[in-house]
Image: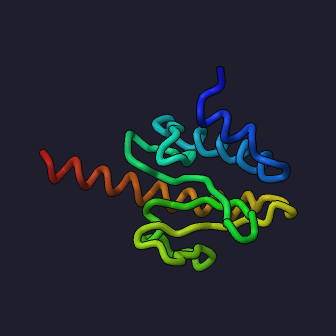
């Protein structure tokens, strides 16, 4: 039996399905402590048990996006905060090739922010 997370990916239509499949694999290989979970009816990625990012799509255009939990701290102007308080999203046109270099830059910044925050919290708590 498929998990809710697997069902979500399987029920997507192409090319969004291919986008999500690639990104789910890409994200978990970024760091050994990243895990995928089905949370709030969304495919979330966690880093050391803390929310890191999630995958979703724009309700109007159907375009998939990656929302970064610490997005408000990220500096890349391509990210869109919209009406979100904390997160920023990177929307990708499913008809175009994935911008791998840009994805690398975004995830590098997001990982750096999350790891620094976790290190800071460890120092404060001890």
Q: Position of residue 110 (x, y in %)?
A: 49, 59
Q: Is residue 96 left or right of residue 92?
A: right
* Residue 107, image quadrant: bottom right
Residue 53 spot, x, y in % from top left: 51, 54
Residue 58 occupies which quadrant of the picture?
bottom right
Of residues 92 and 99, the one nearer the viewer is: 92
- Residue 19 horizontal side relative to residue 65, left or right: right
Residue sticking out furthest to the top = 1
Vertical relation: 105 (above or below) 74: above
Quadrant placement of the C terminus: top left
| Residue 43 sits in quarter | top right
Is 83 rendered above or below residue 108? below
Against 79, is 119 above or below?
A: above
Report the residue at 76% width, 46% height from top.
12
Count of numbered badges drawn on the protein? 0
x and y percentages locating residue 106 in the rendered image? 59, 63
Location of residue 71 in the rendering, given as x and y in whole percent from the top left corner = 48, 67
91 vs 40: above or below: below
**Quarter of the image where the N terminus is located:** top right
Q: Residue at x 59, y 73 (%)?
A: 79
Q: Residue at left 43%, top 63%?
A: 70
Left or right placement of residue 16 versus residue 107 in this view: right
């Amino acid at each position: 039996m498929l998990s809710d997370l697997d069902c979500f990916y399987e029920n997507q239509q192409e090319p969004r399905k291919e986008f999500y499949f690639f990104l789910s694999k890409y994200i978990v290989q970024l760091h050994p402590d990243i895990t995928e979970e089905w949370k709030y009816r969304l495919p979330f990625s966690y880093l050391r048990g803390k929310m890191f990012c999630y995958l979703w799509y724009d309700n109007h255009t159907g375009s998939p996006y990656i929302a970064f939990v610490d997005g408000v701290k990220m500096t890349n102007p391509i990210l869109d905060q919209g009406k979100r308080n904390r997160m920023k999203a990177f929307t990708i046109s499913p008809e175009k090739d994935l911008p791998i270099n840009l994805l690398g830059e975004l995830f590098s910044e997001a990982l750096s922010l999350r790891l620094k925050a976790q290190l800071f919290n460890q120092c404060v708590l001890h």
